[in-house]
Image (cartoon, helix red, strand yellow):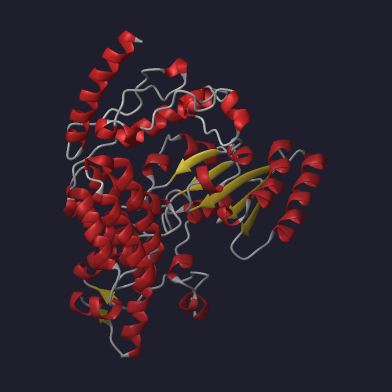
Amino acid sequence: MLKEGNKLQGSLWNDEPLALKLRPKSFEEFIGQDHLLAVGMPLREAIENDNLYSSILYGPPGCGKTSLAEVIKHLTKKEFKHFSAANQGVGELKPLMEEASELFKRTGKQTIIFVDEIHRFNKSQQDTLLQSVESGSVILIGATTENPSFEINPALLSRCHVFVFKPLSKDDVRKIVEKALKFEKITFDDLSIDIISNLSGGDARMALNMVQEAIEFTKRRGGDSVSSDKIESILQKTVPRYRKHADEHYDFISALHKSMRGSDPDAAVYYLAKMLESGEDPLYIARRVVRFASEDIGLADPRALNVAIDAYQASNFIGMPECTTALAEAVIYCAVAPKSNSTYLAYLSAAKEARDNPFEEVPLKIRNAPTNLMKEMGYAQGYVYPHDVEGAFLIENYLPERLKGHVFYTPSNRGLESKIKEKLETLWKGFKKWEAKN
């Protein structure tokens, strides 16, 4: 029931989303993020002492970033401005910064500007904040669900302290839901609250939206309670906790790579399904599998690259959802294939040599000689066409003289590479004998 005297009673309270109703105004009302906001933690002390510094609050949706801004707003004696990059442009932000600059010049008083979803500003738009932050007139508090390392201008990021918010625990979400239900006449049983807490994935806003949906559904039917057997039918299913352009995007593709590299087909196909069922672009996944086939399998099983490319072409040709099995086939094949990164390491080594010595010249013997002048200069002189000799092989040094005998590619003992290794070792022994004579 609503407490008597609450200013938000009546239609305003009933119409307002639960997430807004429960915005905390003090740390006593704030739930979660104890690793940052427990008594004695630096961020909490800075806020309580009104000595806050420019910061980026980074974490998933519904974990308390905007709620903390509300606490800051009520505790600070500085000017406080709330700005949303989702629906306001830089043109609306500039006057706030000009006011902050003028106030600072007149009184020395700083302005805290909270920019919600700051990642929605591009790099040049973020640059407009830099001067005010550097001058000290503005204390910037930016909130983002995207990794600041990728989405925040490095110059701006270097002037801010990054605080990483975690998804709320199930217990924290439950506390928030129970707190919301104190203001409602509709009752929920314990199991239904557990279901909502589990489905939320640590997102309090999502949990409160589910509560509100269940309340409205129940009221429309004249009911006064929500039970566990009703809640799942009301909510149907939760939104998958995966965002294509946030950390989950990189986390899950990394998990897919590492599962294939670790030869675990079950984990690999799970992460594939997780991404595809959450709306990931199948061609993005297919490209990563192609890269994996050449980087982590290589010549240990050259067929893996063919399977991966076939999966890419199939995905491009038939699209979702039919391409899921082609991708699953490629992912499982890559997971169970013998592994070797020898090709990858060979390229890295050769690339380093090429970068470190960019002016190394090709030996005259193996240069092309399409003109008489080139022949007179020694181009192709002494070159023997391998197909003209027995076995189509002759011992020769094709590297620049300085690199004679240098080895870039060292095959592994796995899969087809074991046979490649045997052949190269035989050829290498012959080369060493030839080198000793020459």
Q: Position of residue 360 (x, y in %)?
A: 54, 22
Q: Is residue 302 left or right of residue 181?
A: left
Q: Residue at x 56, y 42 (%)?
A: 55
- At 38% from the left and 75% from the top, the residue drawn is 212
Q: Position of residue 53 (x, y in %)?
A: 59, 38
104 or 142: nearer the viewer: 142
Give above or below for 251 relative to 2: above
Comparing 431 with 73, the one in front is 431
Residue visible at 43% across and 18% down? 403
Judge by depth and name the residue closer to the eye, 211 or 21: 211
Is residue 174 or residue 336 the one in the foreground?
A: 336
Question: Is 366 left or right of 314, judged from the image as shown?
Answer: right
Looking at the image, residue 345 sits to the left or right of residue 377; the answer is left
What residue is shown at x 34% (from left), y 84% (from top)?
Answer: 217
Residue 243 drawn above or below residue 71: below
Q: Quadrant of residue 117?
A: bottom right
Percent x, y of residue 393: 29, 30
Residue 246 is at least partly visible in this image:
yes
Residue 146 relative to residue 158: left or right: left
